Image: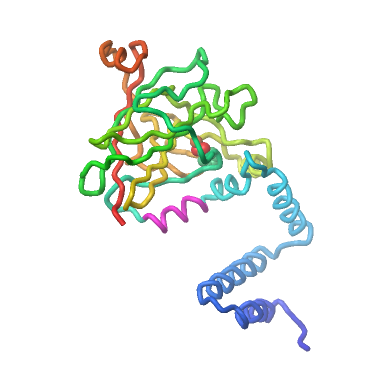
Amino acid sequence: MKDFTVENLTEEVIKAYSANTASPRMREIFTALITHLHGFVKDVQLTEPEWFTAIEFLTNTGKKCDDKRQEFILLSDTLGVSMLVDAINHPKGGIGTESTVLGPFFVPGAPDLPHGADIRRRHLDEAETCLVTGRVTDQNGQALAGATLEVWQTAANGFYDVQDASAPEWNLRGRFTTNADGEYALVTEKPVSYPVPTDGPVGRMLDAAGRHAFRPAHLHFMVKADGCEPLITHVFVNGDPYLDSDAVFATKESLVGDFTRSSDAAEAARFGIKAPYSRLAFDFGLMRR
Ligand code: BEZ
Ligand code: FE
């Protein structure tokens, strides 16, 4: 038997997690995890009350999760971990549209909607009607017919449907399919900037760091086509005051779109909306596998 000390414990724990771990990748992950976790505790000389505060923080983070709330994703997002994983897995400089975080508010199974459909299931007075159109192509600019685009966003009151008991189910969510020319079109409301949820442990962490909780206004997209890598991304609103201080570090220059003001009465009539309206044109490029 051996006495464990500050000097030998890390090495002993790594050995215990390597000896019978068949997968080389799991061994690599265990070794790095234990090295960094122990290194952190040693670096800051963690006290027992601090250790317990961390245990309570993680416990409360878990307790805040349910089928509609993912506080652990929010924790990962606000610590920049989600964007680090994104940046490692989708390095800049590639061709095709850049990706960004999924976020905690994606809900699988959004209703399939026809070309040009309106995803608003209620109309808030403060909301500005917005027409969004574009094309989905592969990285060489070849149109992708039959690609699907799932879209989701907050309402003008700053809440996703799943955060707002008064919102109709699937409000501001839908799945569209591109036509033979790879085109999509949808009607929605212009997105607004909004705070990430601050009524849980993550909110207290942001407070402790003196950080604001806002995300610049954006639309979320998940774009898929046969034979291509799926794309998870946002389109941000050019001019938003939070573009330079996103609470979750998820902005990218190439994902900023121009939401212009249009008075095109003929186009408005085609989509069953009133002019003037907000207008975004944004194309997506997917990478072939
Ligand atoms: C979102 O954009 O929905 C989001 C992303 C990360 C954290 C919170 C919200
Ligand atoms: Fe969002």
The vertical placement of 273 against 45, above or below, is above
Task: Note whether residue 182 is visible.
Answer: yes
Could you tell me residue 167's position as x and y percent? 59, 23
The residue located at (47%, 26%) in the rendering is 192
Q: Is residue 37 above or below residue 208?
A: below
Residue 84 sits inside the magenta stretch:
yes
Rendered position, 27 above or below 57: below
Quarter holding the C terminus is bottom left
Between 75 and 186, the one lying in front of the other is 186
Q: Residue 105 placed where, x, y %?
A: 55, 38
Q: Which residues are magenta?
A: 81-90
Residue at position x 57%, y 29% from top?
Answer: 161
In-front residue for pair 160/3: 160
**Residue 47 drawn above or below residue 123:** below
Horizontal and vertical percent position of residue 227: 32, 53
Instruction: Say whether residue 2 is magenta.
Output: no
Q: Is residue 247 visible?
A: no
